[in-house]
Image (tube, rainbow, N blue to C red):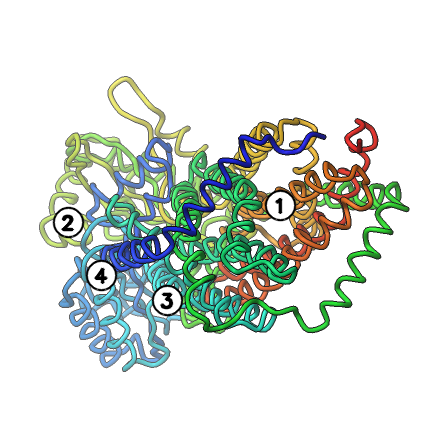
Amino acid sequence: MPPPPNHDSRVAGAVARWLVRWRRSLALLGLVLGLAGVVASRQLEYSRSIAAMFDRNDPAVVPFERLGRTFGSAAAVLAVYDDPALFSPGGFDRLSDLTAALNGLPGVASATSLATTPLGRGIIATETNPAAARLVSLMEGYTVGSDRRTAAVVCVLAGGTDADDGVPGRGDTIDAMRRIMEAYPDGTVAGETVMLRDGFAMLRRDGNLLGTTAGLLASVVLLVLFRSLRWLVAPLAVVLLALWGTRGLLAVAGEKLTMVSTMLSAMVTVVAIATVVHIIVEFRRRRDVGEPAEAALTGALTRLFWPIVGAIATDMIGFGSLIASRVGPVHDFGIMTAIGAGMVLLAVAAAVPWFALAGRFGGDPARVWGEGKLDGGLDRLVGRIVRSPGPILAAAVGLIALAALGLSRLQVQTDFIENFRRDSPVVTSYEIVESRLGGAGVWDILLPVADPVDAATLARVATLEKSLRSEVAAAGATPGSGLTKVLSVADLLETVSPVSLERLERSAVGSWMVTAAVGLLRQQLPQLADSLIGSDPADGSTWLRVMLRARERQPAAAKRQIIDQVRGLVARDFPQTAGRPAGEVTGFFVLLAQLVERMLADQWLTFLLAAGGIFVLLSVGFRSPIIGAIALVPNTLPIVVVLGMLGWSGSPINMGTAMIAAVSLGLSVDSSIHYTTAFRRALAADGAIRAALATAHQTAGRAMIFSTLALVVGFLALTTSGFMPTVSFGGLSCLTLLGGLVGNLVVLPVLLSLAASRFGWAG
């Protein structure tokens, strides 16, 4: 293998000398830009719309947006409490007062409960009034539990379909509702709206705290390792400067943070720490042989210039591959992290030269306690690699094969409540709705109809509802068990009418009576009517809404089966015609069930794009497609093993896990670039494979160990999050970082040594 071309070395040397010469000006410029980034980042907002999590062209978004336009809002909150005397005059008064208080809150468009029915106080006379009994039975699972003591007020929030406090003041509205409910026994608020709002609140806290904590922990590890204050501050400065620059640039560009943006700080920390540690180790090596500080830094930057540029480029390719995802937060995360990786390169140029040579504080990086034993261990590892390459490769292949079988067993976590810790208040609230009100999965069917609504139309709706109640079920379950509640305007009229809709539709008088009843409903109970019958302002079409409820805590396959069955029945009874679109199925239950499934499907696409892009870059950079392919192997190994372990263990994939493949590949291949470059240089110098491996282990390998240790400790901060996708991402990142270290210290040297012997690179 030929040494790096002289032209490349001259370019690296010229850049290194320029950075050292102008270090003070660069540090000042970096400080100014960093402060500007801090100021600009204050304008950075979160994108909280559930629809924004999908591609604009995604067919799932169209009916969801129609739901918001036509019926005012898809964002609803259930205010739930326990009252053993609910069906008494005092219980009715308490419910009525609560409904009025909630309805009067700013941001609440409407509040519906048993106290808002046409029967008024008569609703409590279920034993003597058949109409009251029928109406309570109809509302069971929505505004009253089957135990007849769990009361719920359904509050529809103003402001469109955003499911949390993305609408101005919505967070304040939910907090005000919580304060009101504190005065009621077991009082709480629940629903997808609250759950997503609390999730984003956690993410905001995590974004401000966990990224900083991860950087501090990693820097403390570096302080313990190198015992130098200077080299504690330098990497931390690079992290902060890169992160401020990234957030400021995103704010200026009008980008918004999303559900997975918490990991942005962690990604920037990984790239920055790994880059600076390689510089520290090479700088220290040169200082140990007596080079002056300025010459040592210039030499270190010259030697590491192209490996660092290549490593940052592979990071940007790995992160940037996520842009191909059809899931909004993942797509945006790819843009953010790619920008962040590029910012690390600029931050290193601005901060490291000045910190390395400024004054005399902190001293040079010292040797790690017990580093002599590390020297011996690395030498023994090289000996084992040279003596037993075959068994090492066989073990790696066997491990990959075993793990690959587990990939087919991967499951998707579609229960959004699993994104929170068990002791979280939102979980407690959610479980009350799930257990007492027939299920927390709320979704809708939208049916296009002619206006005015007549008896024939409502009879068709009633027929569809009958099929939904009797036929929908998960695979292997009892038919009719899939939906816990089905409710529409047809049910409301059936409840108050002494004559069935089927009989009414058979005569002109009956049809007129239904049309008149619908008109009266709109006049007397406009809030209830508007939640069931609406006009789409986009085209003036009229739609009926069928409200569905299902158990949220179901396996992904069961949810998929139920949703598919509902869609099939809607397509059968309300198909598309020449003058009218087909019925639509939408809602949070549907969207959240699809979200992680699409992330998992996109994971393999983004992983292939990352692998392909990195292979091309490495092949061009090393001028050898063989090396490009070799460098991918040890970095693919931990990804396959970790995901395979999840498959074998039955642990479901969540939003954090679904991005790990492409991200981890981009991160771990950095070490391969540094190691391969060190191996090439040493091999070109004396032609001895074992000596080249020993040199690579003692330089690049040593830096890999130090940086991985610092990063694993830093990433452990993510596991303290209250948002479980962040916990999963942090934990799995630690595993893949450790796996990448093993792959680059064991598998990569084996492949490089075998290729060097096979292709005559050694002399």
Front label number (1 vs 2):
1
Q: How busy is the neighbourhood of tag 1: few (under 14 within 10 Å), some, or many (20 plus)?
A: many
**Residue 179, percent across and down?**
25, 77
N-term mark: 3 or 2:
3
Seen at 70% across and 35% down, the residue is 630
| Secondary structure of the residue carrying numbered label 1 | helix
**Residue 216, percent across and down?**
47, 69
Amino acid tagged 2 = Leu
Amino acid tagged 3 = Arg
Give the side of residue 559 with respect to residue 591, left or right.
right
User: From this viewpoint, which residue is outermost toward the right?
Assistant: 387
Seen at 52% across and 54% down, the residue is 295
Give the side of residue 535 with respect to residue 203, left or right.
left
Q: Which quarter of the figure has residue 425?
A: bottom left
Q: Eyeballing the image, is 330 above or below 630?
A: below
Q: Which quarter of the figure has residue 400?
A: top right
Figure quadrant of the N terminus: top right
Marks 4 and 1, how far apart at CA: 50 Å
Residue highlighted by disc 4:
170
**Residue 448, percent across and down?**
26, 32
Marks 3 and 4, how far apart at CA: 18 Å
N-term mark: 3 or 1:
3
Q: How busy is the neighbourhood of tag 3: few (under 14 within 10 Å), some, or many (20 plus)?
A: few
